[in-house]
Amino acid sequence: MITQHQTILAAAVRVIIKIIRKGILMTLDGHIKTGLTSSLVFLGTYQSWLSENWSQTSIMIAAILIFIGNLAPDFMEMKVIRHRTYTHFPWYYLIIGGLAYFLGLSGSNLAPSGFDWWSPQWSFYIVAFCFGCLTHISADWPYYGGIPLFTPKRKIPLAGITFESPANRVIEYSVVAFGMGCLWFYGVTAAA
């Protein structure tokens, strides 16, 4: 009998194989593929590292937010903000995700007294969205001049790696191999 996790793992492997065959080009199509892969890897592995007992609804919402977060940095520009500037500045997402984590998920309950409405579930969703945004930004890094690593307006390339360089393909395939390794490891440990 095939379990739900095996079905998810099989879907993730199919997406990863398509990425390998076509290559990852960071257009909308490329970000949809990386967002879908990130969400599927999350769905296939969350039970092995997520300490809380979250409902299936919360897990699915988090996976959807990872996918939406992977598309968000480009859609937030709305033809007003120059591409790969403020919406691609990773420190925003690291700070927001870090604050959300410490406010609700770290167990320290650091939320101020006026934040009675705040719950670990909100933190979980915000962290998932920020993770998706960071996945988008990391996928953009080897392409077209890099990302704004230290200031929102100055792009830094990834160690001189450009879009068409062989090193870029090595990075792409390494990311895909890492995702497949996570899926394989989870599949092996879940079966044991």
Image: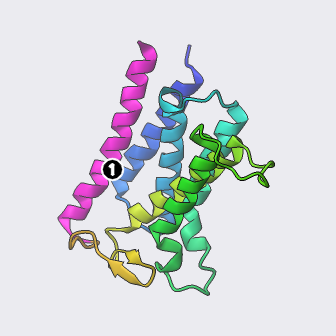
Whether residue 64 is visible to the viewer of this picture, yes or no, is no
Q: Is residue 119 left or right of residue 35?
A: right
Whether residue 155 is visible to the viewer of this picture, yes or no, is yes
Quarter of the rendering containing residue 156 = bottom left
Point out the stretch of residues depicted in magenta: 164-192
Say which residue appears at 34% left-offset and 47% top-offset. Answer: 176
Q: Residue 50: where, in percent of width, then height?
A: 53, 32
Q: Residue 47: where, in percent of width, then height?
A: 53, 27
Colour scheme employed for the rendering of this structure? rainbow
Q: Residue 15: where, in percent of width, then height?
A: 46, 45
Say which residue appears at 22% left-offset and 56% top-offset. Answer: 170
Say which residue appears at 64% left-offset and 27% top-offset. Answer: 53
**Residue type indicated by callout 1:** Val
Quarter of the rendering containing residue 13 = top left
Q: Is residue 169 part of the magenta span, yes or no?
A: yes
Between residue 28 and residue 182, name the one nearer to us.
Answer: 182
Please say if 89 is above or below 120. Answer: below
How many C-alpha atoms fall within 10 Å of the one at disc 1: few (<14), some, or many (≥20)?
Answer: some
Which quarter of the figure is the C terminus placed in? top left
Q: Residue furthest front?
A: 113
Q: Is residue 175 left or right of residue 91?
A: left
Specify the principal SS of the magenta part.
Answer: helix
Please say if 39 is above or below 149. Answer: above
Between residue 123 and residue 39, name the one nearer to us.
Answer: 123
Q: Is residue 1 part of the magenta span, yes or no?
A: no
Check disc 1 and report the residue beneath it. 175
Determine the secondary structure under disc 1: helix
Q: Residue 32: where, in percent of width, then height?
A: 53, 58
